[in-house]
Amino acid sequence: MIKEIYASQVFTDKTMKEYVSPAHIEEYHRCIETGKSLPMETANAIADGMKKWAVKMGATHYTHWFQPLNGGTAEKHESFIEPDGEGSVIMEFSGKELVKGEPDASSFPSGGLRATFEARGYSAWDPTSYAFINDGSLCIPTMFFSYSGESLDKKTPLLRSMQALNKQAVRVLRHLGDNQTKSVTPMAGAEQEYFLIDKDMYVLREDLRICGRTLFGSKPPKTQELDDHYFGSIKPRVSAFMKDLETELWKLGVPAKTKHNEVAPSQHEMAPIYSDCNRANDQNQLTMNIMRRVADRHNLVCVLAEKPFDGVNGSGKHNNWSIVTDRGENLFSPGKTPAQNARFLTFLAAFIGAVDDYQDLLRCSVAYAGNDNRLGGNEAPPAIISVFIGDELQAVVSSIVTDSNYSGTDVKPIKVGVDSMPLIPRDTTDRNRTSPIAFTGNKFEFRMPGSSQSIAGPNTMLNTMVAEKLRQIADAMDKGEDIHNIVRSELLNHARIIFNGNGYDKAWIEEAEKRGLSNLRTTADALPRYLTEKNVSLMEKHGVMSRTEMAARDEIHIEKYCSVISIEANTLMDMVRREIIPAVSLFESILCSTVAGRMQTLSADIPDVESALCRKLAVFNSSLSELVEELGKKLETAPPATDYKAAKYYREEVLSLMESIRKVVDEEEKLIPDKYWPYPSFRRLLFSV
Ligand code: ADP
Ligand code: MG
């Protein structure tokens, strides 16, 4: 059954063979390999085949499906119909329409790359990711760029970074004696965490609806303390959702593989089988989209925010990353022969060196308001970037770096290119869950990306950083330097980024500072590091982004950060003013009438609980009202969201005040019976399904 439905809604190579002639298919593959543009004749033939297939599958529309800089996806649907001149229509779709579209999407963030009077954005077909049918439309994965050719999306830099990595990695492989590998591809497998909340309950929370996360709420008596949810048995309603989700994903060719409960109540995870970064990114976008839609069918809401409930485990998107050759060899697999080990150690050293050199850039790639609520908490990676390699590999690295005997035995020091290494056992490498980047046997697991985030950005950075380090290594090899010395000096110079201890430990923060590692706690701290000369020159050198393209993104990041906080602050004020303060007052008045009644019937020597409670609530309410007025003023006097100072203002002035307000609200919530409290509590939200 899976075999029949799998990729049934995808225009795969196999499907293409049924609709397009072999000569055109050959031409199409040749163009992909050489990067040359498709002859119109071939484009027409493919477009016609796609249309015939899509119409047969019941599709009526097509759309250029692209990924604007807001991190989501966008589509503008056109129907296939063309008038036939006799009062009826025919279904048409030409090569021109396939290859280039003009969505005229002037309201997507472009960071000043397009003035609105020349608002046209153009999209160009990405033939390296399959077209698919979603909701009655043929979706054509596309890049999106401005009239003058600057990229306005997340896909274009990702594709460029994959090419950059390919180029440098092949250079290094040649030096290592590999004359057969034609190309290498960075691979990604994104584990997607999410919450499922009952829709009836969800709609009652203004904060969840508008901001995607709750802005207050006291912790329920039980959340994850008993560790009874992680990998626990899946409830029937959740299981029905998961089955439905898998079926939809399989039809779309998304290889959904693993599903399980996560740490927090109502939290779950879905992991697909990895694929090249570009497809993995497209598929992850599609996954988030389908998750929301399928949840709705089950009267559930799929919450993808990084930290929807304070005090409860947050959601991330672990990005597993590796480099694989066209012959299927994983360059991060420790091998069995000295040659394979030389290759493994070279790529390992390149990765470690790259992460150390560009730790700030990598940190920036996961910096946004939602992720700030999660990173650095005691269940998510710290904001400090480091790499965990595990004890076995550490022993190898130490032997190389210090020329000491491997593992303290009388075996001699390891010589890269001469010796083979002992086998690194796979499963022992995954134990450290506190590390932001862990080596897990044959890949690196980057755990900082947030659950709602596009993985395009983080992968673009990983690809480009490692490409640069490989370039340096290849250049050194061009000059005849010895591979052992190259690997050794990389590992020696970048030893500080390796950390195998507990990342949640307070002592690590001090230790990291001593090592000179960055600790960019919030987005407001990280953003100023994005546009440094070092980062701009990295991106320019490898043709991934121009300075202008980076500056545009910088502008968007700042603006987005400030506006997310501003929307949250306004929502919080609204909820407190219109619902919470009045609800507490109402309960106070009930307490007051109880007190009045009691004075007539009971003697005065019985302690009066109601008066005390009423007084407490009155004090909370009055400080709440003052704080909310203050927040209103802070928002009125906020600087325009155009520079780092504005981001800092929102972090220091607005967000911190929101945190103070939250504390008071949470105290009130603890004292008010559910029936007077205007919003469903965490207790009800988290145990609703
Ligand atoms: P776990 O992390 O739970 O041990 P796995 O290691 O099997 O589970 O896989 C987690 C994710 O990593 C999956 O999405 C998987 O497809 C992906 N993955 C596995 N191998 C690679 C690889 N070589 N490159 C990139 N991603 C990979
Ligand atoms: Mg994992």
Image (tube, rainbow, N blue to C red):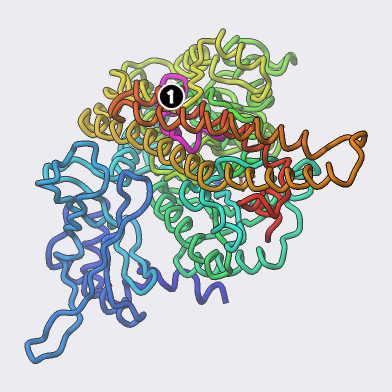
Quadrant that contains the C terminus = bottom right
Quadrant containing ligand 2: top right
Query: Can the viewer see residue 51 in this picture?
Result: yes
Spot occupied by residue 329 in the image (x, y as percentages of width and height): 49, 44
Q: Is residue 581 left or right of residue 470?
A: right
Q: Which residue occupies the foreground of this view, 236 or 396?
A: 236
- Taking the view exactly as shown, the residue that stands out farthest to the bottom is 86
Residue type at mark 1: give it.
Ala
Q: Is residue 89 left or right of residue 326?
A: left
Q: Any magenta on residue 258?
A: no
Instruction: Indicate whether 7 appears above or below 579.
Output: below
Spot occupied by residue 481 in the image (x, y as percentages of width and height): 39, 15
Instruction: Indicate whether 550 appears above or below 303.
Output: above
Spot occupied by residue 90 in the image (x, y as percentages of width and height): 17, 84
Give the labeled residue for mark 1.
354
Q: Is residue 269 left or right of residue 167?
A: right
Quadrant that contains the N terminus = bottom right
- Taking the view exactly as shown, the residue that stands out farthest to the left is 85
Query: Can the viewer see residue 444 in this picture?
Result: no
Q: How many marks?
A: 1
* Highlighted magenta segment, given as a residue range: 355-374
Q: Any magenta on residue 366?
A: yes
Q: Which residue occupies the foreground of this view, 607 or 234?
A: 607
Does the beta carbon of the residue at mark 1 sit less than 8 Å from ligand 1? Answer: no
Spot occupied by residue 36 in the image (x, y as percentages of width and height): 18, 51
Residue at 39% of width from left, 54% of height from top? 282
